[in-house]
């Protein structure tokens, strides 16, 4: 069974284009970024939701586990603010010192030509890879899924393919992300080729700025990942 067939059987990715769906994204982000890793500290009045000033100008998506219709992951593509298109994207606002402008200068692009992959999160239960147990009936859903999907990292790959799909459907030319090197290496194995445009800095862990051109999204994908991408792309 291919990764796309596994995905089709177990998961669904859709745009978070309703208030309820976006709230699911914010709650997942709260679980991951606030509770688990402590990256963000939010006022008590915000409730169990992680939000910021970029959410209104972003396209959001949810990864759903079909078995119980549970939202288990999310991602967003931050676009230019239509009201203030000259305002910087998060990576430039917070990590401009990490970017080598001789390789890639965000200030040389027109508003709207850049977008940013951001707030990619998977709840811990489904993210953690564990060894399969002999009796599937006694295992939580995450363990069963990891066994069935073998070594293919379907969750992180899906949650990058979804914003890549949104990039292709937007007016942006380049997608930028602050990522750990190990994630870049993982994605590269499957033909998702981000290019380094700077140095590693401390930003929710050790991360560096990377970029991909919209025309390169499909060009290097392995056949199995291209099939998976098309499945997700059609659903979005």
Image (tube, rainbow, N blue to C red):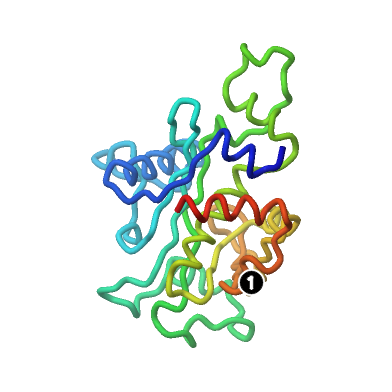
Quadrant where the N terminus lies? top right
- Residue 87 rendering spot, x and y as whole percentages: 35, 75
Vertical relation: 228 (above or below) 9: below
Left or right of 139? Residue 189 is right
Residue 154, given in percent of the width and then of the height, sits at 64, 43
**Which residue does the image show at 36% across and 46% down from the upper left?**
50
Residue for point 54% across, 68% down: 176
Q: Which residue is denoted by mark 1 in the rendering?
A: 216
Tag count = 1
Judged from the image, the secondary structure of the residue bearing numbered disc 1 is: helix
Q: Position of residue 105 (x, y in %)?
A: 54, 83
Q: Is residue 18 left or right of residue 68?
A: left
Q: Residue at x 32, y 51 (%)?
A: 17
Which of the two residues, 29 or 8, is positioned nearer the viewer here?
8
**200 w.r.t. 18: above or below:** below
Q: Residue at x 74, y 34 (%)?
A: 150
Q: Residues within 10 Å of mark 1 (few under 14, many from 20)?
A: some
Answer above or below: position of 13 versus 149.
Answer: below
Residue 161 in picture, x, y percent from top left: 57, 55
């Amino acid at each position: 069974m291919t990764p796309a067939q596994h995905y089709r059987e177990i998961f669904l990715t859709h745009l978070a284009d309703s208030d309820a769906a976006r709230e699911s994204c914010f709650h997942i982000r709260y679980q991951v970024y606030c509770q688990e890793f402590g990256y963000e500290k939010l006022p008590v009045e915000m409730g169990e939701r992680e939000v910021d000033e970029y959410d209104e100008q972003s396209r959001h998506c949810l990864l759903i586990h079909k078995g119980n219709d549970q939202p288990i992951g999310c991602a967003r593509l931050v676009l230019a603010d239509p009201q203030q298109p000259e305002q910087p994207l998060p990576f430039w606002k917070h990590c401009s010192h990490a970017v080598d402008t001789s390789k890639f200068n965000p200030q040389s692009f027109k508003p709207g030509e850049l977008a940013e992959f951001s707030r990619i999160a998977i709840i811990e239960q489904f993210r953690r890879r564990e060894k399969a147990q002999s009796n599937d009936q006694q295992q939580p859903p995450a363990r069963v899924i990891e066994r069935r999907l073998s070594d293919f990292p379907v969750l992180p790959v899906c949650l990058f393919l979804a914003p890549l799909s949104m990039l292709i459907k937007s007016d942006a030319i380049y997608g930028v992300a602050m990522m750990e090197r190990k994630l870049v290496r993982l994605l590269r194995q499957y033909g998702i080729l981000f290019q380094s445009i700077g140095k590693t800095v401390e930003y929710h862990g050790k991360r560096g700025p990377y970029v991909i051109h919209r025309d390169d999204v499909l060009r290097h994908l392995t056949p199995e990942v291209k099939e998976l991408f098309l499945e997700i792309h059609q659903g979005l």
